[in-house]
Every structure is written in C-alpha cells, then in structure tokens.
Image (spheres, rainbow, N blue to C red):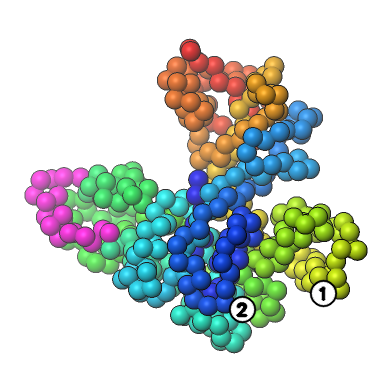
C-alpha cells in the first residue's frame, strides 16, 4: 500500500509529508525544495479490534494508544509539479514515474491562493485553488495519454488486422500503472468505444480512456492546506459547494507538525486525528510556544475537528480505496509465539475473501487452505467468505 503526496511546488507538500511521517525532510519557501522523492511511513488510524476481546494489543508494526490502532502505510512525497510536467518540464516525467506504484494520491493544494502557477509565493487570494486542482489532474491525465499514444497508430492497425483484443493489449501496455485488462474492458464499455474499430478512435476518445483509467488506478483526494488563513476557509466552502464530486479535506499541515513535535518532546499529550490535546508540563514552554499551541487549539482543532493530516491519510485508504483492516488470530489464542496479543493487522482491498487473506499471510496457507474461522463469532467459514473491516480470522491449512 503506497500513498503518493503530490502538488504544485511550495504549497506545503513536504510539510504535510513530514507531519504524516515525522521524517526529516527539507522544508523551504521556494520551488523544488524536494528533488528526489522522499519515502516514509504514515499510519491509518482505526478503532482497534482488541476492545472486542477486552484486552490490549501489542502491535509488531505501528502502535496502539487508547485502543486506537495505527497501521503503517508507505508514503511517497515527490517534487512539485509544474504546468507541462507531462512534457518533461520541471523534471516532470521523472516525477510522474515516481508515482507509478501509488495506490492513491493526496493532492496538497494551497487553499489560501498564495502560490502562483510556478510555485512561487504570492499574496493570499491572488490565485484560485480550483485552478491548481484541475491543473494537476490534467497533467496526470496527459501522462497516461502519453503512454497510450506511444506507437498508437501502428498498435491500433495491428489490433485491427489481427482481430486482437484492445483490452488485453492496453492492459499490458499500462500494467506499470497498475491498470488491468478488466479495467480497460470496463472503461471501453462505459465509453461505448468499438473494440473492432480501434483505428477509428479519436484523440479525444484516447484522452477519455486515459482519464478514466487514471481515476481508477490513481484516485485522488484534495488536501485544502493552510486552512488557518481566513481566505482559505472562504475558498474551501466555495469549492466544496461548487464541486461536491471532489473529496476535499480541510488541513493545516504546519499545525499537525507543531503538535507532533510538541508531543515528541513530551510537552503535550496528543493523538493524531484528535480534536484536542493536553499540556503535560507548562513549565517547559515559553510564552511564544504556549501562544502558538493555544492558537492551534482554538483556530484549527476546535474549528476543523482536527488538523486534517490524519483525516486525509484515512480518507485515502478507507474511504476512497475502501480498504479494510483484518487481524490474524486464533479462537483459543490471540497471541503469537512471543506473547504479543493481536500483533498483526493487514490492510486489504474491498472484496477480500478468506482465501485471499490466507494467501496474504503465506502462499502455502492459500495453496493448502482447508477453512477459516471467524474468531469473533467462533464460526467456520469457507474460502469465498467475504471479510469485513476489523474481522479477526484464523486460517487452517493442510500443512
């Protein structure tokens, strides 16, 4: 599972990434502070299933606090994209290639409108954030189109002459973007494009195919960053009303980073995604620090319900991708050989069956599958049984 953090230069992308992962990255007020992609670990926050068993889990990866389980996911932060990125401008092709394995994209946008199209600081309100939303979507759509267009005319004639299947051919050509033959087939049907006349497909048809496949393989949420600036709130409510189809998360990445750094130094007690925090030792804070933290409490947490960073990661994985969290465990024993209770938790795609989960745990478990047990209900289930969010499953195999 990989989440790609994308956006124009200088909109708070690297701040969001650092706030999500606490990785030490360069944050600077100029374009292309990030050149090479940064990789880090973020977390999906879920209600831990340990409460069902009235116990406390001991995660092998991630952590659990107050029965809130934080499940790790890979997060990649690429350099800021500029107009014409798909044509190679601003290292565009290299940066887009870095996103090939991302399952979903988190698009960080300066909702204060204080960054021009080249990623340079400008006066708040001088740019419409919606222009940045459409610009980046178009750049990625054109990137997909460019891959489809490579040798398209020759490719289309060959399919036509040999009566080949364009779904199979395009699926193979775009497999590096996690496009499947089935996805192409669904898109072609929805667009009513004739499979037997691919030479007649127009450039607009190909763009429609590219855009549809991008939405399937790189679904995007919008992070409305810099919401601590008043004009950003005005832009958020306007764009949210005008474009209800967009998933937009209000955010103040700087606030989240400040809270996590304060919590790291044990100055406050704060759980990512919460709407409040507690001071643990006022004596260690100077007046400036107290003022800043109280500003965040009153103007970000109370108004927005959170800083938005954790909400965005959760929205990408749980709401957009609709992944579910599944725990391996036993009816008679929830601990592993080291005594850790419910040590593992796996994020699985929607529609995951008991057999799919068996293969996730180990290939041999899948090949030699006998049955699975729904541990909460203490009931055996078959290989095709669809699993649900927060299920605990015991796998029985022949070896």
Q: Residues within 10 Å of mark 2 (few under 14, many from 20)?
A: many
Disc assigned to residue 288: 1
Say which element carries label 1. Answer: helix
**Between residues 308 and 33, which one lies in front from this camera angle?**
33
Q: What secondary structure characterizes most of the magenta part? A: helix
Q: Residue furthest left?
A: 161
Q: Position of residue 208 (x, y in %)?
A: 32, 62
Q: Position of residue 320 (x, y in %)?
A: 54, 52
- In this view of the protein, can residue 134 be seen by the observer? no
Q: Is residue 122 above or below residue 198?
A: below
**Between residues 58 and 36, which one lies in front from this camera angle?**
36
- In this view of the protein, can residue 154 be seen by the observer? yes
Measured Cα–Cα span from mark 1 to mark 2: 24 Å
Disc assigned to residue 393: none
Tell me whether circle 1 and circle 2 mark residues in contact (CB < 8 Å): no
| Residue at x-position 72% and y-position 65% | 258
Q: Is residue 260 above or below residue 87?
A: above
| Residue at x-position 45% and y-position 17% | 368
**Between residues 165 and 129, which one lies in front from this camera angle?**
129
Q: Position of residue 122 (x, y in %)?
A: 56, 85
Q: Is residue 149 above or below residue 225?
A: above
Q: Residues within 10 Å of mark 1 (few under 14, many from 20)?
A: few
Q: Position of residue 38 (x, y in %)?
A: 50, 58
- Which residues lie in the magenta part? 147-165
Say which element carries label 2. Answer: loop
Disc assigned to residue 112: 2
């Amino acid at each position: 599972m990989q989440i790609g953090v994308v956006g124009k230069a200088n909109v708070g992308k690297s701040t969001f990434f650092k706030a999500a992962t606490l990785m030490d990255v360069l944050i600077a007020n100029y374009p292309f502070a990030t050149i090479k992609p940064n990789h880090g670990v973020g977390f999906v926050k879920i209600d831990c299933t340990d409460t069902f068993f009235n116990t406390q889990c001991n995660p092998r990866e991630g952590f659990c606090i107050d029965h809130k389980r934080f499940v790790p996911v890979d997060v990649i932060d690429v350099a800021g994209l500029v107009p014409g990125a798909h044509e190679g401008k601003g290292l565009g092709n290299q940066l887009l290639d870095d996103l090939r394995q991302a399952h979903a994209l988190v698009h960080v946008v300066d909702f204060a409108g204080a960054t021009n199209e080249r990623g340079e600081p400008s006066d708040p309100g001088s740019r419409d954030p919606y222009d940045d939303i459409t610009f980046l979507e178009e750049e990625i759509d054109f990137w997909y189109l460019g891959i489809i267009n490579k040798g398209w005319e020759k490719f289309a004639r060959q399919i036509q002459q040999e009566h080949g299947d364009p779904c199979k051919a395009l699926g193979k050509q775009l497999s590096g973007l996690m496009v499947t033959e089935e996805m192409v087939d669904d898109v072609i049907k929805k667009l009513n494009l004739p499979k037997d006349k691919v030479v007649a497909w127009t450039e607009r048809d190909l763009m429609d195919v590219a855009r549809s496949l991008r939405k399937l393989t790189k679904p995007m949420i919008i992070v409305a960053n810099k919401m601590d600036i008043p004009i950003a709130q005005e832009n958020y409510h306007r764009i949210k009303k005008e474009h209800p189809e967009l998933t937009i998360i209000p955010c103040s990445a700087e606030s989240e980073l400040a809270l996590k750094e304060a919590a790291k130094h044990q100055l406050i007690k704060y759980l990512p995604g919460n709407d409040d925090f507690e001071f643990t030792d006022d004596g260690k804070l100077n007046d400036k620090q107290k003022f800043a933290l109280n500003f965040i409490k009153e103007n970000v947490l109370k108004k927005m319900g959170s800083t938005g960073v954790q909400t965005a990661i959760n929205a990408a994985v749980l709401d957009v991708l609709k992944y579910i969290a599944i725990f391996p465990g036993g009816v008679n024993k929830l601990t592993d050989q080291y005594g850790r209770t419910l040590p593992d938790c796996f994020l699985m795609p929607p529609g995951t069956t008991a057999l799919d989960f068996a293969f996730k745990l180990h290939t041999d478990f899948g090949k030699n599958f006998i049955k699975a047990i729904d541990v909460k209900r203490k009931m055996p289930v078959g290989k095709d049984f669809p699993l649900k969010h927060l299920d605990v499953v015991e796998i029985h195999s022949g070896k």
